[in-house]
Image (cartoon, rainbow, N blue to C red):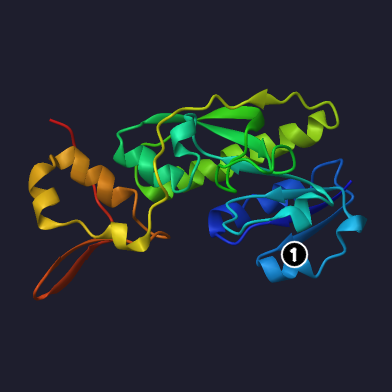
Amino acid sequence: MKIIFLAYRQWSLDVYPSIKKHPRVEESVLCKTHDELLKLNLNKFDLIISCGWSEELGDEITSKIEAIGVHCAELDRYSYGSPLQLQIIDGVTRTKHRIFSFTFDKYSKRAHTHNRLFSHEVDLDLSGNMSDVLYQMTSTSIVLFNRYLDDMPNISWQEWPEESIVRQKRNPIDSRLKKEDLLKMNTEELYNFFRCLEDPYPNGYIEDENGKLYIKQVEFKKK
């Protein structure tokens, strides 16, 4: 099997060596940018594996080759972008990490990070600092992709149950915590807000007439 692996953040780049060594992978290419992907002759490959990829693949890609990715949410409301941040802010502590298909149902209204069908899943713990969560994402991605390659071509797809609730993708401006919101939040809510925006994401900050105070790392102890 010949695969293309898409990744650019460090946690996802750390997944690649394990997938590259899978017994069924004869040849692999790592792409860190969408331009690198577009330069490849897709007809020479069997599968695209996307890990933490933020670019739209588009029909020009998914019409030519099977493509899968991983999505770190159990509920459909987190299918539209920023799933880690939104779940942590909402107080979710346990979720799912799943393989989804770009190829099937590619005209879904959902974001490119999640279509309607998924196959393999494992539990994902959202506690700790962002470095802890991303370390776990590396491990669970390795498990998921290896299982998928083990089971090909006998993949059993399941439908992702839809919800009427939609949590919209966050933008960098959303990292600003307004003073009026700060006063309404308890210490655990503040902890969740700032920890989900630790590196490599746009750090949370408080702003006044003097400047911006960035919170790069936080710690919390329950009473």
Packing grade of label 1 (10 A; few <14, some 14-19, many >=20) is some
The structure residue drawn at horizontal position 44% and vertical position 48%, both measured from the top left corner, is 82
Where, by quadrant of the figure, is residue 23 drawn?
A: top right
Q: How many marks?
A: 1
Asked if residue 179 is positioned above or below residue 160 in the image, the reply reads: below
Image check: 78 left or right of 48?
left
* Spot occupied by residue 211 in the image (x, y as percentages of width and height): 15, 74
Asked if residue 94 is positioned above or below residue 29 in the image, the reply reads: above
Asked if residue 216 is positioned above or below residue 168 in the image, the reply reads: below
Q: Where does the C terminus fall, quadrant-wise?
A: top left
* Spot occupied by residue 25 in the image (x, y as percentages of width and height): 85, 46
Q: Is residue 1 visible?
A: yes
Q: Amino acid at mark 1?
A: Leu
Where, by quadrant of the figure, is residue 83 drawn?
A: top left
Image check: 95 left or right of 18?
left
Where, by quadrant of the figure, is residue 198 drawn?
A: bottom left
Q: Identify the residue position indicated by label 1 in the image.
A: 37
